[in-house]
Image: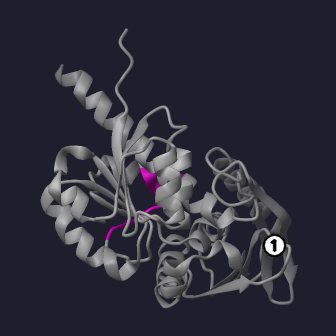
Amino acid sequence: MKPPHKYRVAIIGSGNIGSDLLIKIMRSEHLSCTLFSGRNLKSVGIQQAKALGINVSDQGIGAISADPDICDIVFDATSAHAHMHHWEILRKLGKYVIDMTPAKLGEFCIPALNAKSCVDNGAKNINMITCGGQSSIPIANAISAVHADIEYIEVVSSIASLSAGPATRANLDEYIETTEDALMRFSGAQRTKAILILNPADPPIDMQTTIYAKITNPDIPAIRDSVEQMVAKLKEYVPGYALIVPPTVEGDRVMTTIKVVGNGDYLPQYAGNLDIINCAAIAVAEMIATSEQVKERQHA
């Protein structure tokens, strides 16, 4: 039987996220990168892509506008502001778009929670929220599965400063707003707060996220069981995801901490923030690809 063809993807943005994403996509059984586009052919990311034999461009979104047939899915790894413009173009071209920025235009997606519904419902713009959102929201959701009446959730993510590129730093306000909105949606909490710390420590620290939930009379054994099940789901697509402090009562709150160790594809293993959002994005893209391949076989 002839194996299904790989779904063609383009990456816009040659920074840390886009460059790490490219290496991960090259290992995919369902995806093939046909374009890596940024703004400077001399950038480290584009030079790396070129060395890997990938078709590169310095025309950004313009490279797709000039040749719409070059891809089926577009990963936008630029900035929230730029994505506003990019979506106007890509929507008219009928492309699937996986937004790596906190632009909040598309359908919020956490693979462990709702990737299948996003794909089944035909969402064309899928928003991967933020790295802190991908690491914390599944845990918040697992807690809410036990206690639906969460009064307040606060998440604090700490990442190595070296892993945060210019676009991430420019998007800090959008990061906070998008993470908080998604937290509220997936946990049902009445109030949410997100904090991101860019830690300049040398050697760089691994990504860690601590989740605090204010709950009346928390059932800790049930919460632990729910959280451990969710961690197992996450590890299916983010191998470096780990629970390091199980849910426990701290004052009037339930507290738990997770760590994400990266695969070391583009930046060293401390850059778990790249892995958590990129692995999530690839999981969704592969689901889109396999769904489209099934449709093609049905119509063959």
Location of the N terminus by quadrant is top left
Residue sitting at 18 percent across and 45 percent down? Answer: 69
Q: Nearer the viewer, residue 255 or 51?
A: 51
Compared across the picture, whether 189 is left or right of 6 comes to right
Q: Give the image quarter of residue 209.
A: bottom right
Answer above or below: position of 172 versus 54: below
Observer-nearest of 14 and 198: 14
Residue that label 1 marks: 205
Q: Is residue 284 above or below residue 136?
A: above
User: Most extreme residue toward the left, as rendered?
Assistant: 92
Q: Nearer the viewer, residue 220 or 47?
A: 47
Magenta stretch containing residue 159, yes or no? no
Q: Residue at x 42, y 65 (%)?
A: 13
Decide: few, some or many residues near mark 1? Use Cα within 10 Å; few <14, some 14-19, many ≥20. many
Q: Position of residue 53 (x, y in %)?
A: 45, 41
Instruction: Judge whether residue 126 can be spotted in this image.
Output: yes
Secondary structure under the numbered disc 1 in the rendered image: loop
Q: Is residue 52 above or below residue 40?
A: above
- Looking at the image, which is closer to me, 120 or 106? 106
Q: Position of residue 223 (x, y in %)?
A: 75, 65
User: What amino acid type is highlighted by mark number 1?
Assistant: Ile
Please identify the residue farthest to the front as the structure is shown.
42
To which quarter of the image does residue 106 belong? bottom left
Q: Residue 13 vs residue 217: left or right? A: left
Identify whether 135 is placed above or below 104: above
**x and y, in percent, of residue 114 in the image:** 46, 56
Question: Residues in magenta?
Answer: 106-115
Q: Can residue 283 be seen in this snapshot?
A: no
Provide residue 98's location: percent of width, then percent of height: 37, 59
Quarter of the figure that contains the C terminus = top left
For the point 37% across and 32% down, which residue is it? 6
